[in-house]
Amino acid sequence: PVVAATRVPTRFAMLAMIAFAVLCTLAVAHFRDRLPRARRFLVPAVAALFVCELAPVPRRLYSAHVPEVYRVIADDPRDITVLELPFGFSDGERGEGAFAPENLFYQIAHQKPLIGGALSPLTGRAFKRQHALPMVPVLLRLSEGKRVAPQLVDRAVRSAGSLVRSARLGYVVINRRTTPP
């Protein structure tokens, strides 16, 4: 629990990393002073690890390409929200559905609010509030690739209009690579 919570907010992760770096430095100093034979290889080995870690080589983690659909959404002047499928939400520690962090990146391009996504914090009350709308639990389960009882689907379909109106839903974007059938 403590380690997972360091991700929310990020400043706690930075403090944890600094503490870990100090502990590693103390461990290297301890072994260097206590083990004379380790002196020959310990410091050069740690230095080599730092060179590998901090080398200024190009590293591509994620593509910065924004699909064209998000440019269409960005050009829409209406005050609307976007629903991404697969659907999910997360607060960094826990979540439901199939939350995709790339959707937050795409949100930078289109500048519209998302239904779902990264919510903070997700208390028990926030989870209940999310599940109060009949559409949300159905979308979460379907996004996870799970089956949903037909009566729940029917109830969600009947209430879809109220979700569209209350959320001012303007677009539903379906990622065909990751959305279960």
Image (cartoon, rainbow, N blue to C red):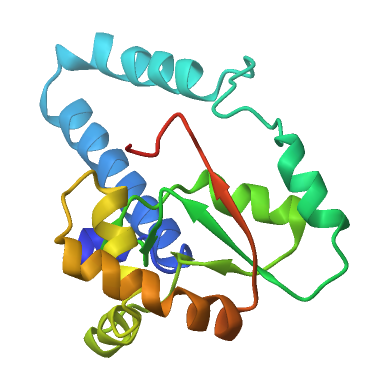
In the image, is residue 142 above or below residue 50? below
Closer to the camera in the image, 107 or 152:
152
Q: Nearer the viewer, residue 78 or 27?
A: 78
Q: Quadrant of the N terminus?
A: bottom left
Q: Quadrant of residue 122 in the image?
A: bottom left
Let me know if residue 2 appears in the view: yes
Q: Position of residue 41 (x, y in %)?
A: 26, 10
Position of residue 141 relative to residue 48, above or below, is below
Which image quadrant is residue 171 in?
A: bottom right
Residue 93 visible: no
Task: Using the image as rendered, state which of residue 55 and residue 179 is in the foreground.
Answer: 179
Residue plotted at (42% across, 19% down): 47
| Residue 8: x %, y % from top left | 39, 67
Residue placed at 58% from the left, 66% from the top? Answer: 114
Q: Position of residue 177 (x, y in %)?
A: 45, 29
The quadrant of the rendering that contains the C terminus is top left
| In this rendering, position of residue 21 left or right of residue 9 | left
Residue 124 appears left or right of 169: left
Q: Residue at x 44, y 69 (%)?
A: 9
Is 42 in front, or is 106?
Answer: 106
Relative image position of residue 58 (x, y in whole percent): 64, 16
Q: How many marks?
A: 0
- Residue 57 located left or right of residue 47: right
The residue at 38%/76% (across/down) is 158
